[in-house]
Image (spheres, grey):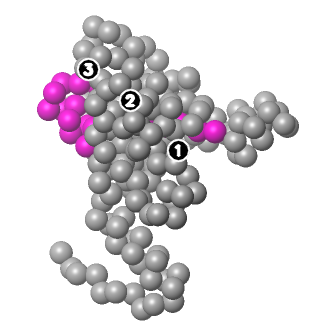
Amino acid sequence: MTGMDEGFHDERRGRRIVVGVSGSLGSLAALHQAVDEARRTDAEVLAVLAWLPQGGEHGYRRAPCPPLLAAWQEGAVARLREALDEAFGGAPTGVRLSAQVVRGDTGPVLVQCADRPGDLLVLGAGSGSVLRRGLRASVTAYCVKHAGRPVLAVPRPTLQRELDALRRRSAWHLPAALVPSH
């Protein structure tokens, strides 16, 4: 594990909320939910971004290149910092937050990070697309099945649902549906 903020694992600090962050709108919504919950309960937040080498672990083992691996890890650290910046304009105020990038598959990494009694695992619920579920296992489903802690799946934001609908209509060359103004 590579921590952006070391010293997070101090048991005296109390409850933790572990949140999966990828930079997607769904993960940013989960991050906001985790921070809101932390403010209500005086918990710490651990933002986790899981990453794999391009081509996966098997591809990397076939042609290892340590400088390239370091570049991918640096890219993961940058993505996590960008996600925090997009969500809060930097670190959120009024809450203790640490961040880690961890090499590995997202579901297992998040379950491993939320390993203490009292931990809460928060993540975006994902797209729900049948095609995407068929191509890639759901991180949410994995975490719900394997986590030994409570899991809070935050629904996709309205904006994400509207963008997905627009993409589907565009892919089928249909006119864009009128989006109701709020």
Q: CA distance from mark 1 to mark 2?
A: 25 Å
Determine whether the residue tagged by mark 3 lies in a helix, strand or loop.
Answer: loop
Seen in the image, is 142 located left or right of residue 29?
right
Image-quadrant location for residue 56: top right
Image-quadrant location for residue 149: top left
Q: Mark 3 highlights which residue?
A: 118
The disc placed on residue 147 is 2
- For mark 3, does the 10 Å Cα neighbourhood hold few (<14), some (14 to 19), or many (20 or more) residues? some
The disc placed on residue 133 is none
Q: Give the vertical position of 138 relative to 76 (above or below).
A: below
Determine whether the residue tagged by mark 2 lies in a helix, strand or loop.
Answer: loop
Q: Position of residue 74 (x, y in %)?
A: 63, 36
Q: Mark 1 highlights which residue?
A: 79
- For mark 2, does the 10 Å Cα neighbourhood hold few (<14), some (14 to 19), or many (20 or more) residues? some
Decide if residue 146 is in sight here.
Answer: yes
Looking at the rendered structure, the kind of residue marked 2 is Ala
Q: Give the vertical position of 163 relative to 111 (above or below).
A: below
| First of labels 1, 2 by sequence position | 1
Image-quadrant location for residue 179: bottom left
| First of labels 3, 2 by sequence position | 3
Residue range of the region highlighted in magenta in the rendering: 33-52
Q: CA distance from mark 3 to mark 2?
A: 12 Å
